[in-house]
Amino acid sequence: MGDLAEVRPLLSMVQRQVLDCIRDHVRSYGYPPTIRHIGAQVGVSSTSSVVHQIRQLEQKGYLQRDPYRQRALRVVDGGPEDSRVPAAIGRSSTTWSTPGTSSPARTSGMCR
């Protein structure tokens, strides 16, 4: 048999929406959205629920966080479903996206 690709756990609908929201925001602005912004975009009013979903995405291998920086999230590339949107345009996949970095002009306040 050949090498098997790494298989990551499937995502719930809310986890997929959170991940897509983070990807879209990083692609548009160059840095991750706030917890409140993610919650507003995916219809989750509790910030602790959003944090829980982010932790689940971390545990499943879809996100990495820098524990020493606020809002430092990185979408982990891998597999065909992750190749449709880069982690951040113009940045290597190993670069942390943090607020205050060069960001493109804002076109809307929506993730999607």
Image (cartoon, grey):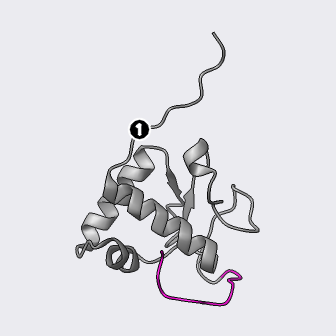
Q: Is residue 106 magenta?
A: yes
Q: Residue at x 37, y 76 (%)?
A: 41
Q: Mark 1: which amino acid? A: Pro
Percent coordinates x, y for residue 2 in the rendering: 66, 14
Q: Residue at x 67, y 90 (%)?
A: 105
- Which residue is tagged 1? 9
Secondary element under disc 1, as helix, strand or loop, is: loop
Query: Looking at the picture, does residue 50 appear above or below residue 111?
Result: above
Percent coordinates x, y for residue 87 in the rendering: 63, 60
Percent coordinates x, y for residue 17 in the rendering: 39, 62
Query: Looking at the picture, does residue 63 appear above or below residue 51?
Result: above
Query: Looking at the picture, does residue 93 appear above or below residue 45?
Result: above
SS majority, magenta: loop
Q: Is residue 46 magenta?
A: no
Please indicate whether residue 28 sits to the left or right of residue 73 in the image. Answer: right
Residue segment shown in magenta: 101-112
Towards the viewer: 92 or 27: 27
Percent coordinates x, y for residue 63 in the rendering: 50, 54
Q: Residue at x 41, y 45 (%)?
A: 59
- Mark 1: few, some, or many residues within 10 Å (few <14, many ≥20)? few
**Quarter the N terminus occupies:** top right
Task: Choose top left, top right, bottom left or bottom right for residue 6.
Answer: top right
